[in-house]
Amino acid sequence: MSSKPHATVERLDVVRAEIEQAARTAGREPTAVTLVAITKTFGAEHILPVLEFGHRVFGENRVQEARAKWPALRARFPDIELHLVGPLQSNKAREAVALFDVIHTVDRGKIAAVLAEEMAKLGRRPRLLVEINTGAEPQKAGVLPEAADAFLTECHASHGLVIEGLMCIPPLDEPPAPHFALTAKIAKRNGLSILSMGMSADFSTAVAFGATHVRIGTAIFDARS
Ligand SMILES: *Cc1c(COP(=O)(O)O)cnc(C)c1O
C-alpha cells in the first residue's frame, strides 16, 4: 500500500529541512542545492499534492514513463522542470530532448552525437550532465573516471555540446563519500558547476561534498512497489 498524499508533502518538507541543515553544516547556502523529486513508478495522484504544495523540480528514469505522465501535469503547471536521471537509448533521444529540461545521463559518443542532432532539429536545448561510473561497475552506465576528461572534450569538440555538470550513483555496497569526492574533483578540474549526486540514503553526505542537485525518491514518495 502506498501512503496518503498529505504524508508525501510532509516527507518532502522533512527532506527539504534536512537538505537545508546539511548545507548549513557544510557552510553552503541552502539555495545552492536543488531537490529533484524522483517520481518514477508514482502516478499523478502522488505527484499532484507535491505540485500543489509548490514544488516544481522532478525527475524520471525512463523516457516512456515520463511521456505518459508529464505532459498532462505540465499543462496544469507550466513551470515544471523535468530531469531525466535514467539511461538514455539513442532511439529515445528525440523524445528526451522534447520532454526534459535537464538530462543527467550523457555517457557515450553515440548519445552525445544523437542529442546534438536532435537538439538542432527541435531547437530545444536541455541542460546536459555526464554520468560518471565512479565505482567502475560493469552493469552500470556512465563514463569511467579515467575516461571522463577525454569524453568531456569530445562532447564539446566533436558534437558542440555544452556539458554543465556531472552525475554519479555510488555502488550500493560502499560508503558513498569517496565517490562523491571523486565526482566533485573531476567536475572541478573541468570547470563544471553542476553536481548531481545524493539519493534518499545519502543526500546529506552528497551535500557535504558539494552536490548542487540531489535526486530523492523514496524519502518523499515512500517505497516503490
Ligand atoms: C530512483 C533513482 C533515484 C532516487 O532514489 P531513492 O533511493 O528512491 O531516493 C535517484 N537517482 C536515480 C538515477 C534513480 O534512478
Image (cartoon, rainbow, N blue to C red):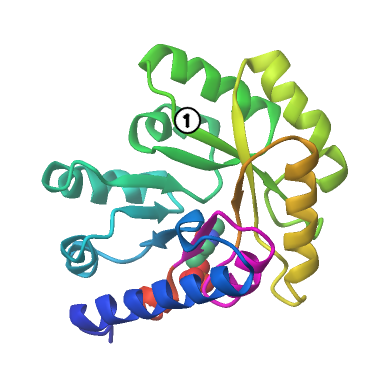
Percent x, y of residue 204: 59, 74
Instruction: State the residue at coordinates (64%, 69%).
Output: 26
Q: Quadrant of residue 39?
A: bottom left
Quadrant (top left/top right/bottom left/bottom right) for the N terminus:
bottom left
Indicate the position of residue 36 as horizontal and vertical percent values: 42, 58
- Residue 174: give x, y in percent of width and height: 77, 75
Badge 1 is on which residue? 93
Q: Is residue 35 left or right of 27 when viewed as pictured?
A: left
Single out the residue that lies furthest toward the left: 76
Q: In the rendered structure, does residue 6 fall within the stretch colored magenta?
A: no
Q: Would residue 222 be seen by someone viewing this image from the given angle?
A: yes
Q: Nearer the viewer, residue 172 or 179?
A: 179
Q: Secondary structure at mark 1?
A: helix
Place residue 79 in its image quadrant: top left
Mark 1 residue crowding within 10 angstroms, few (<14) / some (14–19) / many (20+):
many
Front position in the image: 18 or 27: 27
**What is the span of residues highlighted in magenta in the rendered image?**
198-216
**Which residue occupies the foreground of this view, 138 or 57?**
57
In which quadrant is the C terminus drawn? bottom left
